[in-house]
Image: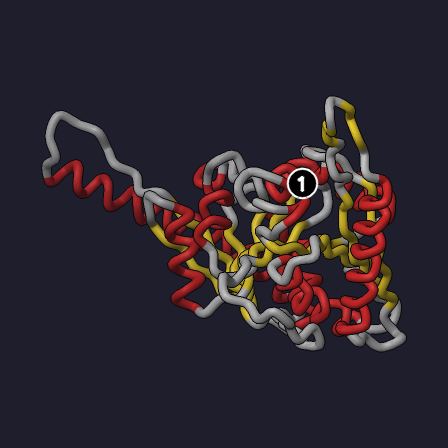
Amino acid sequence: MYRSILVPLDGSTSAEQALPIARGIVSKIGAGAKLQLVLVHVPTPARYVDGVLMFDETLETEIREHEHNYLNNVIKKLALGPEVSVTAEVLSGRIGKVDEILHAHIVNTGVNLVVMATHGHGPLARFWLGSVTDKLIRQSVRPILLVPVREKTEETQDLTREEIFQHILIPLDGSAFSEQILEHVVGLGKLMKADYTLLQVVEPVVQVGYSINEEIIRLNQILREHIQTEAQKYLDSVAERLRVWSLQVRTRVIIDRHPATAILEEANRQGIDLIAMETHGRGGLTRLLIGSVADKVLRGASIPVLLHRPRSEP
């Protein structure tokens, strides 16, 4: 069960788009829930003035004070009840080390879940393009819920709004590694009474020969049906394990050469509001994060994506 939720902010309304989801989670948890807001302060670089390297300490003090005031303002706007503990902290960082500062904070404070926008401005700028988010996902043993930023946002957002998940899509590949996401997403779905769809994308098998004849076509069809049947059996077995907990679980097997595209299309077809997946697996989901399926899903998703880096021993 999630108890401590971390939301990294950077002073922008873009980064604040993670807050309605974080608020929805802690509100459902209720008593004992903790929401941490953090902002990583990166010192302004020293400048040469008349050949002398100068560091403006007064400016640094003013910036830090502004950052503290900003976080305190966000807490006031959230207006969460006394049953939820909300804290804010400005962390000392360095240029190019924001991800390391955040990771250390996550480990040291016992955070259960990170909720963050996929890009923002300031120290956390270019979250998406191989920067802070990508590095943090590679390091963190905690699940990270990534919220795609809407391009057009109001200057002042309603931070009392709560977002919940009603239907969660979980891509699996038949491996114990990919199933590690279940322990993280089921707890989240239970809080929100969500339905689940388990999805396995199987790449089509083509028999290579000197020519395509009726026999080759027939063998391909038999092999395809066998693979699809085995995938369905696997998903049904996982679904039964979840249904023991009185969860509403559907299953879906898709034959497609492009797993990421199939996942996104299925999410759109079913009106999914969260995709949850491990960053590594095997088969169609091998090396998910490293320029493959998870990377493509994140780039193409218009809904939140929950990612988790699996333990080496599932």
Q: In which quarter of the image is the C terminus?
A: top right
Q: Residue 213's x, y, as percent?
A: 10, 36
Q: Is 132 or 67 nearer to us in this picture? A: 67
Q: Residue 165's x, y, as percent?
A: 60, 69
The residue pinned by badge 1 equals 136
Q: Residue 101's x, y, as percent?
A: 78, 39
Residue at horizontal 73 percent and vertical 56 percent from the top: 7
User: Would you place residue 56 above or below residue 85 in this image?
Assistant: above
Asked whether residue 286 is in view, the answer is yes
Asked whether residue 180 is in view, the answer is no
Residue at horizontal 52 percent and vertical 60 percent from the top: 169
Q: Is 299 or 167 nearer to us in this picture? A: 299
User: Would you place residue 292 above or below residue 171 in this image?
Assistant: above
- Which amino acid type is shown beneath numbered disc 1? Leu
Local packing at callout 1 (Cα closer than 10 Å; few below 14, some 14-19, many 20+) is some
Which colour scheme appears in the figure?
Answer: secondary structure
Label 1 element class: helix
Residue at horizontal 71 percent and vertical 76 percent from the top: 160
Q: Residue 1's x, y, as percent?
A: 78, 60
User: Would you place residue 166 above or below residue 279 in this image?
Assistant: below
Choose top left, top right, bottom left or bottom right for residue 153: bottom right
Q: Which residue lies furthest to the top in this view?
A: 51
Horizontal side of 12 relative to 282 (left or right) equals right
Q: Is 10 or 113 nearer to us in this picture? A: 10
Q: Is 47 or 198 nearer to us in this picture? A: 47
Residue at horizontal 57 percent and vertical 50 percent from the top: 277
Q: Residue furthest front?
A: 50
Horizontal side of 147 relative to 219 (left or right) equals right
